[in-house]
Amino acid sequence: MADPQHTRDRILDAAENLFFHEGITTTGVDRVAAQAGVAIVTLYKHFGSKDNLLREVLSRRLHAWTQHWDAAVAAASSPQTRLLAVFDAVETFRASSGPTQWCCFLATASERPIPEDGIGDPVFELIRQDTRLVSERLAELARGARCQDPATVAATLLLLYNGVLASLLRGAPSDPITRARDTARLFVDSCADATGPTRS
């Protein structure tokens, strides 16, 4: 008897691969079911709709990304390096996750219109949740690093983070993670409170 969790994971793996290599809009659930080796009725039994399937793919990616960022922050040796750990997390996350064309959240946002006011969209809400997670956590870490303007530091690091993801898609410049981390370190050092802890 098939393990329901194993079947669910196979469908999610297939959907993630197809959605973010060939495009969300152009990928039908029949293609996902075929790649996962299940009947379409099985796919619908587990997820109910294509939107629900996409939402679960993104939710799984967000959970995995958060785990990598948690580990990178825990491994850092100072408040400043904890703030810069977002770039270490990008590196380890990309090395461990399945290959995709680029950031799943940016890819989804590029294909999905922003919902009108008052109209709920659970998929787009996950995109917003990802953005809030990155922004709020960077601001919290910037406060811990005694940066004078945590909101500005968080916004600048978010810009560099987005630039890394876009550069990985473009293929240039080379080694964008290292370049962004070095740029972020210079910026954070320039914004740090002179009475704050030194970077190790």
Image: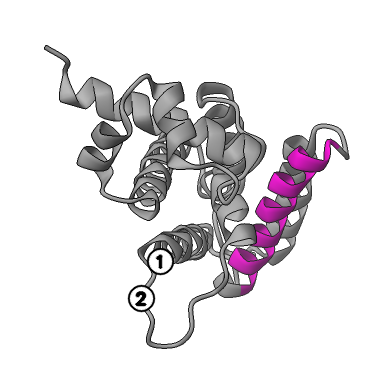
Residue displayed at 68% across by 57% down: 188
Q: Residue at x 55, y 42 (%)?
A: 27
Q: Quadrant of residue 45?
A: top left
Tell me where residue 171 appears, x and y as whole percent: 83, 36
Using the rendered view, name the quadrant where residue 151 is placed. Answer: bottom right
The answer to whether 88 is drawn above or below residue 162 in the figure is: above
Where residue 148 sits: x, y (%)?
A: 60, 72
Figure disc tally: 2
Q: Magenta region, mostly helix, strand or loop?
A: helix
Q: In which image quadrant can residue 119 be found?
A: bottom left
Give x and y (percent) for residue 94: 58, 30
Camera-nearest residue between 19 and 41? 41
> Over which residues does the magenta segment extend?
152-171
- 76 or 99: nearer the eye? 99
Marked residue nearer the N-terminal end (2 or 1): 2
Q: Amino acid at mark 2?
A: Gly
Disc 2 element: loop
Q: Position of residue 49 (x, y in %)?
A: 32, 51
- Evaluate whether residue 192 shows in this view: yes
Q: Nearer the viewer, mark 2 or mark 1?
A: 2
- Name the amino acid, label 1: Glu
Q: Residue drawn 57% across and 70% down?
A: 113
Name, please, the residue furthest toward the bottom. Answer: 117
Q: Which residue is mark 2?
A: 120
Q: Are marks 2 and 1 in contact (CB under 8 Å)?
A: yes
Q: In the picture provided, is 107 more to the left or to the right than 116?
A: right
Q: Residue furthest right?
A: 173
* Label 2 to label 1: alpha-carbon separation: 8 Å
Q: Is residue 90 above or below residue 159?
A: above
Identify the residue under disc 1: 125
Task: Judge the density around disc 2: few (<14), some (14-19), many (≥20) Cα neighbours within 10 Å.
Answer: few
